[in-house]
Image: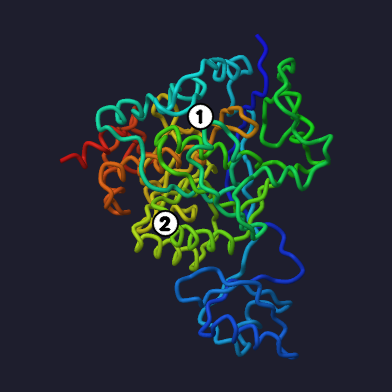
Amino acid sequence: MRFKSVFVLVLLCGLWPAKASADNRFIVRTTLDLETLQTVCNLPLLPCTVVRGLGDPGGQLFLITSPLDLDELLALPLGIVDAEADQLLNLFPIGSLNTMPPTTDLKNLLSDRTPVHYPDTRGTVWNSYANQPAAHIVGVAEAQSQFAVTGSGIVADIDTGVDPTHPALRRVLLRGYDFARNQPGGSELTDISSSCLRTSCPPPPCPSCSAAQVNQSTAAVLDQSTAAVLDCNQQTPCQYVAFGHGTMVMGVIHLVAPTARLLPLKTFKSDGTGFLSDIVRAVYYAVQNNANVINMSFDTQTNSPELQMALSYANQNNIICIASAGNDGQSAPPLNVYPAEWQDYVMGVASTSDADTPSSFSNYGDAIVWVAAPGEAIVTTYPFNTYAAGWGTSFSAPFVSGASSLLLDMQASTNQSRAAGAVANAAPLAPFTPEKPMGNGRLDLVQALGSMAP
């Protein structure tokens, strides 16, 4: 049997500092308003430029560029209360081919393309997506049926964007915003159409194409019709290494909560890079645009007081925040993982196998993990009307984001603390591995929803 447009990606995603640009970028909190700050920065002896405000409720948080370093900037008469470097971060795949099963098994993951209605009254999806093992493990169908919930509210995803034309998602997608380009719309297809030659862009699905192994840092098995755009190595850096990540994450949210509205907040480009300031801005945008849940399938080892403050503000506005625990296969502590480490504001999510054991790549430790969820061979949506299988805590976190939407469907007043308390009613890992603590256990939707039932 031949498979068309089949993508199986190992996307083990973390954030790492990238090389800074010539002009330094700073996230600055000041006592001045935008107009006054711009006036001061325009003075001849003050080398600074105000790029934009970052959307905080007080209107006192800005992105500023300057050739000065941070200490020199703090000495300027800008009324600065606090400042931090605006780091360029990489949504960078790590891991190896050892994470993947043999190619034959990969094909089997996506072999059942029987169209099934999902949810019952809207559109169709592949059966291998709707009825995959991970969905059975966390109890998606059982929870939806037993508690008559399919998801409520708006779930925002801070990511690479989404394919807005995907038939499984388009009915529930909101327009979103592209912070990387500072324009409305959260489509990740803009990275393809604006940055590649017509001959190298992925063509429509090819019925006669066969699967091929390509030399890619993410280790992928994909259809030859798209190998040109994704093929890369050390000599040829891949500008599409993170392409499809946002669409895949949103597909998992939709799997759990198919009637939740999805808000794509594009802060990362398809090469995996994104600025911290755009992430901070996206959190405030989510609050201003009535999001109920924020999914963050990324992590960084660098603390950011302003991102922490933004997530605290989101919680104050009854937004539930979820983040992936990262894929270094290490313990925290000593490892620092943000935003998962801010457990007062965020539920950190680790990855487990289908056998309810910790994934070898997943970070662990109660300091960053509130709960675990399946993160291996997760079948989900992928751009160009197809599906993919992914590995990583990036695909564990959206199970909990979808769960939060189900909780909102049961009780509209659910906030961060209530959602965390419900999700803590989880299934124990088998066998229990004290050397790799995974918070409260593996997500169990029936137990979580049952804990909130009247």
Left or right of 45, for residue 160 = left
Above or below residue 253? Residue 414 is: below
Q: Is residue 98 above or below residue 330?
A: above
Residue neighbourhood size for the residue with mark 1, other residues' Cα within 10 Å, grouped as few (<14), some (14–19), many (≥20): many
Taking the view exactly as shown, the residue that stands out farthest to the front is 121
Q: Position of residue 155 (x, y in %)?
A: 44, 47
Above or below: residue 225 compared with residue 189: above
The image's mark for residue 170 is: none
Residue sitting farthest toward the top? 1
Dot 1: element: strand
* Residue identifier under label 1: 378
Identify which residue is drawn at 64% across, 27% down: 7
From the top left corner, tell me how far across and down residue 279 is, in percent: 55, 59
**x 45%, y 41%: residue:** 398
The residue lying furthest to the left in this view is 454
Quadrant of res 287: bottom left
| Chain-order first, disc 2 or disc 1 | 2
Q: How many marks?
A: 2
Residue 25 placement, left or right of 330? right
Name the residue rendered at 45%, 62% in the picture. 288
> In the picture shown, does residue 429 fall above or below 364?
above
Q: Which quadrant holds residue 73?
A: bottom right
Q: CA distance from mark 2 to mark 1?
A: 29 Å
Residue type beneath disc 2: Asn
Residue 290: numbered disc: 2
Say how the picture is coloured.
rainbow
